[in-house]
């Protein structure tokens, strides 16, 4: 990978050298930008792109990723909460717009205004608290109104929408800049659920306009919405009829992944993406064991013949899932371009792998925990989860190098 950024342990002296290290992450800035350009091309001309860096950039380091995206011209970023937004703002300055995607507490409103954040709102109480904070600071607060069209999480439903929009329409200090919703089944082309959500969103937009609120941005699509295609077409057309711009919120695609479409086909976006993250470590021990030797907790693995094992200084405390243990998910890592299967149980901070058939493995050799030859989907497969969960679960407790 070119233009790689490294995140390593305190005693790591640079990616790729022989300094002491536990594990580190390498992020390709070039691939990140390439993935962004792919999203923009497939989403269509005139569609605003919001790069989702919430949950610490899906485990890729929110600030690091944000710097690359803003450098590539991205104007909008999505963060989890006010705390994460404040951290990104402190590092990047006043440049990008930051959408707080996962709601706000009323006590957060002063900081929302002070840090120049744009919150997602859906209650009269949200608006009232932001009015108070905005008036105290002498600043108008731009917000995005979320509609609950079928997720039953965030958002105001159609029954409660009129009261919220009336409060927005009459507010001196709070301005509705955007209206959004979120799809539950965007990977399902032609889904009845998605069609019902679109209908509810369209009805909600009519209520918004009827009350005199004119949002500049309308957004419904995420990575899967762009990949599947019909949602983005619908949003573009709907926004245009309102005199607004369509926006897409993309996270997973930026990092090189799409969820599979329910049809089994590869979507227009998925075929163009490349993962940007590699997670690596080094071998800290090598030993031979005789037939009959047990390995790891519970003695769950018994060698059937002479074996050569390599010891790695990572385990489930670092995000390497215990489900990858031999006899469970039968996970593997990559050493010298070859698979080295996990032997015994992944423990808290150590993992043992089989290098019997990989010649010359020695202490200090580089190991790919996640990257070429062992993807986030592979980890998800043996862990019974999804790639999002794997990426977010890498325990990033290190400093940027």
Image (tube, rainbow, N blue to C red):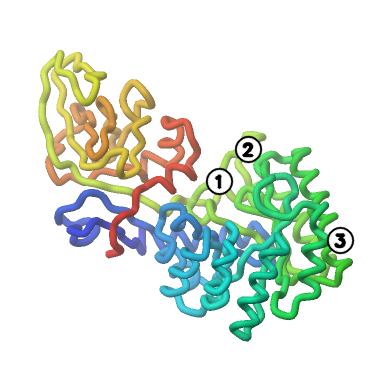
Name the residue rendered at 34%, 62% in the picture: 5
> Element at badge 3?
helix
Q: Residues within 10 Å of mark 1 (few under 14, many from 20)?
A: many
Q: Which residue is mark 2?
A: 265
Q: Earlier in the sequence, mark 3 or mark 1?
A: 3
Residue 153 in view of the camera: yes
Viewport quadrant of the C terminus: bottom left
Residue 221, image x and y in percent? 67, 54
In the drawing, does residue 307 fall left or right of residue 216? left
Name the residue rendered at 28%, 39% in the picture: 315
Q: In this rendering, which labeled residue sits more in front, label 3 or label 1?
A: 3
Note whether 193 is above or below 137 in the view shown: above
Q: Which residue is mark 3?
A: 206
Q: In this rendering, which labeled residue sits more in front, label 2 or label 1?
A: 1
In the drawing, does residue 38 fall left or right of residue 348? right
The answer for how far apart the CA atoms under marks 3 and 2 are is 35 Å
Q: Which mark is residue 258?
A: 1
- Residue nearer the viewer, 212 or 344: 212
Numbered-mark total: 3
The answer for how far apart the CA atoms under marks 2 and 1 are is 12 Å
């Amino acid at each position: 990978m070119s233009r790689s950024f490294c995140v390593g342990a305190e005693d790591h002296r640079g990616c790729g050298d022989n300094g002491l290290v536990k594990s580190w992450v390498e992020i390709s800035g070039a691939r990140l930008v390439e993935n962004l350009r792919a999203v923009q091309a497939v989403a269509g001309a005139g569609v605003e792109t919001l790069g989702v860096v919430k949950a610490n950039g899906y485990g890729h380091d929110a600030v690091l990723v944000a710097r690359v995206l803003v450098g590539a011209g991205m104007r909008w970023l999505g963060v989890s909460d006010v705390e994460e937004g404040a951290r990104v703002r402190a590092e990047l300055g006043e440049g990008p717009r930051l959408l707080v995607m996962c709601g706000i507490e009323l006590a957060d409103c002063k900081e929302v205004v002070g840090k120049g954040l744009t919150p997602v709102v859906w209650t009269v109480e949200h608006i009232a608290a932001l009015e108070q904070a905005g008036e105290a600071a002498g600043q108008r607060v731009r917000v995005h109104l979320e509609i609950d069209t079928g997720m039953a999480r965030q958002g105001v439903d159609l029954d409660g929408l009129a009261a919220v929009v009336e409060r927005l329409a009459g507010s001196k200090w709070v301005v509705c800049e955007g209206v959004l919703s979120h799809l539950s089944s965007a990977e399902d082309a032609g889904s009845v659920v998605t069609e019902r959500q679109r209908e509810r969103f369209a009805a909600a937009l009519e209520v918004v306009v009827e009350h005199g609120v004119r949002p500049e941005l309308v957004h419904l699509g995420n990575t899967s919405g762009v990949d599947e295609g019909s949602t983005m077409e619908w949003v573009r057309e709907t926004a245009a009829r309102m005199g607004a711009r369509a926006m897409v919120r993309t996270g997973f695609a930026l990092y090189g992944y799409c969820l599979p479409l329910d049809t089994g086909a590869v979507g227009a976006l998925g075929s163009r993406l490349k993962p940007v993250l590699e997670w690596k470590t080094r071998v800290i021990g090598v030993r031979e064991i005789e037939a009959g030797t047990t390995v790891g907790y519970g003695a769950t693995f018994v060698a059937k013949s002479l074996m050569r094992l390599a010891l790695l200084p990572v385990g489930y405390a670092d995000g390497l899932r215990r489900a990858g243990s031999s006899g469970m998910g039968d996970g593997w890592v990559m050493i010298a371009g070859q698979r080295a299967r996990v032997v015994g149980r992944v423990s808290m901070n150590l993992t043992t792998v089989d290098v019997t058939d990989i010649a010359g493995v020695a202490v200090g050799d580089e190991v790919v925990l996640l990257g070429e030859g062992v993807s986030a989907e592979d980890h998800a497969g043996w862990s019974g989860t999804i790639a999002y969960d794997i990426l977010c679960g890498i325990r990033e407790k290190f400093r940027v190098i």
